Image (spheres, rainbow, N blue to C red):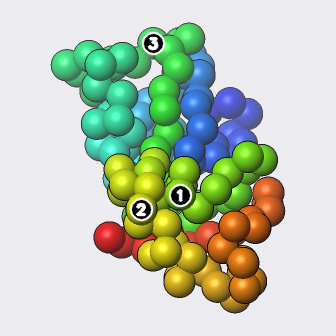
Amino acid sequence: MTQSGHRIQPGTSYTVQQGDTLSAIAQQAYGDANLWPKIYEANKPIIGPDPNVIHPGQVLRIPILPGTKYTVQQGDTLSAIAQQVYGDANLWPKIYEANKPVIGPDPNVIHPGQVLDIPHR
């Protein structure tokens, strides 16, 4: 069971709790337990060779995935989000184009709490 069953925000870190599994964490982060390999791949150096063995206290990065939604956090920019998602900050226009109705006319102004669709590359 993840921290009190609360939603885990992609793009943040998550501290493993007793009884957690990668599939349970993926369910809380993405609403889909089958996306656990994405968390494993992002954290292989921390987890090690066996994705079935995670330990309380490990701090895992919860990646933002293309094809999912992302809630803007304080200090976010479209280029920083693009860097996390695609590994290329210059792809920020792709996120902007997919979210113009939410963001508005200025791509340099995004607000915490806005929910953005993260398109596939």
The answer to whether 62 appears left or right of 105 in the picture is left
Q: Amino acid at mark 1?
A: Ser
Q: Tag 1: Cα neighbours inside 10 Å, few (<14), some, or many (≥20)?
A: some
Residue with the mark numbered 1: 79
* Comes first in the chain, label 3 or label 1: 3
Gap between marks 3 and 2 measured at Cα: 36 Å
Give amino acid for label 3.
His
The local secondary structure at tag 2 comes to helix
The picture places residue 58, in percent across and down from the top left corner, at 50, 15
**In the rendered view, would you say 81 is above or below 17?**
below
- Residue under label 3: 55
- Crowd around label 3: few <14 · some 14–19 · many ≥20 (10 Å): some
> Which image quarter is the C terminus in?
bottom left
| Residue 101 located left or right of residue 87 | right
Q: Which amino acid type is marked by label 2?
A: Asn
User: Circle 3 — which element?
Assistant: loop
Residue that appears at 41% across and 34% down: 22
State the separation of the CA atoms marked 2 and 1: 6 Å
Task: Find residue 47 and report its horizontal and vertical position in percent.
Answer: 33, 19
Sequence-wise, the earlier of marks 3 and 2 is 3
In this rendering, the answer to whether 13 lies above or below 107 is above
Q: Nearer the viewer, mark 3 or mark 2?
A: 2
Mark seen at residue 90 = 2
Secondary structure of the residue carrying numbered label 1: helix
Image quarter of the N terminus: top right
